[in-house]
Amino acid sequence: MKKHYLLTPGPTPIPPEIAQKESLPILHHRTSEFSAIFSEVAEGLKYVFQTKNDVLILATSGTGAMESSISNLLSPGDAALVASCGNFGERWGKIMEAYGIKPTIIAAEWGKTVNPADIAKALADNPQIKAVYATHTETSTGVVNDIAAIGEIVAKTNAVLVVDSISGLVGQEMRTDDWKVDVVVSGSQKGFMLAPGLAFASVSEKAWKLAETAKLPRFYLDWRKMKKSLATKETPFTPAITLIVSLAEAIKMIKAKGIENIWAECKLLARASRAGMKAIGLELFGDKPCEVVTSAKVPAGVEGGKIVKMLREEFGVSIAGGQGALKGKIIRFAHMGYIGKADILVGFACLEMVLSKLGYKLEKGKAVAAAEEALING
Amino acid sequence: MKKHYLLTPGPTPIPPEIAQKESLPILHHRTSEFSAIFSEVAEGLKYVFQTKNDVLILATSGTGAMESSISNLLSPGDAALVASCGNFGERWGKIMEAYGIKPTIIAAEWGKTVNPADIAKALADNPQIKAVYATHTETSTGVVNDIAAIGEIVAKTNAVLVVDSISGLVGQEMRTDDWKVDVVVSGSQKGFMLAPGLAFASVSEKAWKLAETAKLPRFYLDWRKMKKSLATKETPFTPAITLIVSLAEAIKMIKAKGIENIWAECKLLARASRAGMKAIGLELFGDKPCEVVTSAKVPAGVEGGKIVKMLREEFGVSIAGGQGALKGKIIRFAHMGYIGKADILVGFACLEMVLSKLGYKLEKGKAVAAAEEALING
């Protein structure tokens, strides 16, 4: 009987039109019906990624696509650069460690963004660097890196630029080709409005050149097999059929609304979220807040974990807390995918009640009013 | 408007009770609700695998679980043994090749099974072998290997036994612990009656010892992370939530029927399928047919690909043809998961029409009659 409201940065709510597709009788993947859907989706993903490059489809969650961007581009002993500013940026380094790659790491403090000039300097210092790994929207802190600027810098070198836009894509402006990003990885359960289990990687010509000679081991995550499947419409292994059928529906919805309109809508929701937080005295976390998730510091005297727990248990509202070093220190509201204006208001109304019950002094209705104001007046 | 009948060895039809679960509002994976389902499923899988060992859950298709059994058990330079008798057996060798492992390969002819004595000999010849990789039901040919006998042999050595039971599990008798199998891998889209995108690996204590020291690189497929998640109920990465929720329903259905009863039912369907093939003069393919898929040779003068195509296009019936060297030479009827008695009869009735249209001489109704007879009288 409990009604749930998801304001989490993945999974995000699934629209009924898409959810219904999940329960249709399953298609066999070696049929003309499925091949047609597969082609349509492969083409549609190019629009979503704003690229002319191939977009590969993996039956993994987002981390599988991240790992594939390492095992398909690098060889043992290769130099690589990681530009990190949070939990997901650090994941690039952890995956490399598992593969014996010792990257140069630019680690901005959590909550800050990466300074593109630092990347330029690192590349100038070490022209052997084959690939630069960065994060678009760093979900763990809620900031957005300047991928356009980083793209300009990396494009002038022999290195390729790989960007984790798992939480960013669809909601936050990403112009893969205009911004000269060689590889963009994403996942199904955020802006795409799907269940988790599907991941994507767009791959430029410059990146394909590396993929053809890279020596790190890979089989299930081998891009070369996936590229072949784009031509033959026959996936190398059994694909996540129901998710791909749902993805076709999601892409139709995204196209119908227009990617730029979705970016604008997320921007509006982000403004409303920031306004709501500030109106009840919560300090925003992060230097350059992104449009898909809003982070605020837990006020002194309140236990962060309790906010998240009470919101879920008493009101069915799921938001995210902090990860790693930020555990208990921040709360995060997501506004991407099928999260709408009214959901943000539900989130703030319930947050007001919970904070109030936890002893934090606030004037009830103020966060909601500020968010309403922003939603109406932009 | 086209009505589909799936008689393919993956995906198999999804029961409505399970399909409906796929379209429910998505749960967040860091909640007590999801943790409860995750625990229930982890426990239920032990029943399905007939093991006391941990059963790990991967968000990949079956090949991801196969690859994980190589990257988590072996180190560069390790000796391994592959006992292969078809396309999926050969896949073990191909994955190892990608990782630079050079296995000893016992390759039985496609259609034959592996002789357990050959494994005993290879292990005696090379006591350095760390792991033996075999296939339970070889889906590409339709035979079943004697895993109980292989288990006895391998258990006497220091090597671990890894078995691909992706198509076998649930439908074909598999007694993981009694048969001393260290690792059994499986996938969601066959006997489990789910959509593809989820894979499993049961891991024995003997295998965990190898996993703790194995040096091949892995991150997304790292069993150590997954083991930890069984204790904490927190998956290392976003899990395939909707598939896991569906899996809980599938396990309930499997338990309600009883695994031994499911094995018996598949045995009956296999007998009926073999009887139907023979009744219209089709020669069975394979030495020791398994209970989850029945293979028959395409009769002389008929194009195998046309049978599969015409069945699908004219009658909506999906069966499988041959793979690799067997392409065009065999047809395969699956009888596992949610494929029932009447589906087999539909398959044969339409096969009779198609073969007849393709110029093959047969008496209409004979395959159906023989299958009926077997279904009634066992």
Image (tube, coloured by chain):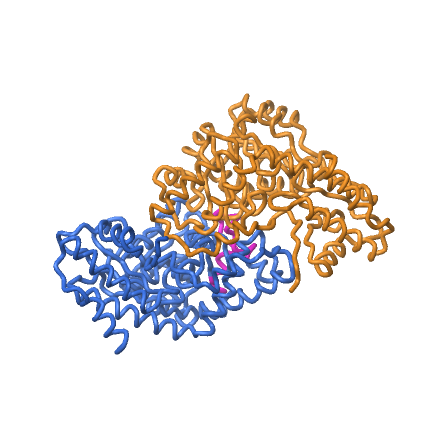
Chain colours: A blue, B orange
Please state the extent of the stretch shown in magenta in the rendering.
A202-226
Of the 4 image quadrants, the one containing the N terminus of chain B is: bottom right
Q: Residue furthest top?
A: B156
> In the image, residue A132 lies at what x, y percent?
37, 58
Q: What residue sits 22% from the left and 55% below the top?
A: A330
* Residue A223 falls inside the magenta stretch: yes
Q: In the rendered image, which quarter is residue A367 located in? A: bottom left
Find residue A110 and report its image quarter.
Answer: bottom left
**On-image quarter of the C terminus of chain B:** top right
Question: x and y percent of residue B253 in the render?
Answer: 53, 42
Residue A284 in the image, given as x and y percentages of width and height: 20, 63
In the picture provided, is A269 more to the left or to the right than B296? left
- Which corner quadrant of the image does residue A83 belong to? bottom left
Location of residue A25 in the rendering, given as x and y in whole percent from the top left corner: 58, 56
Q: Is residue B134 above or below residue A241?
A: above
Magenta stretch: residue B148 in it? no
Single out the residue that lies furthest toward the front. Answer: A1
On the picture, is A47 further left or further right than B109?
left
The front one of A136 and A349 is: A349
Relative horizontal placement of residue A26, taking residue A359 as reference (left or right): right
Hey, which residue is sitting farthest bottom in the picture? A377
Nearer to the camera, B41 or A29: B41
Q: Nearer the viewer, residue A32 or A213?
A: A32
Confirm whether residue B135 shows in the render: no
Visible in this render: residue B125? yes
Residue found 31% across the figure and 55% down from its top: A316
| Count of numbered labels shown in the rendering | 0
- Between A158 and B322, the one lying in front of the other is B322
Residue drawn at 59 percent across, 22 percent down: B124
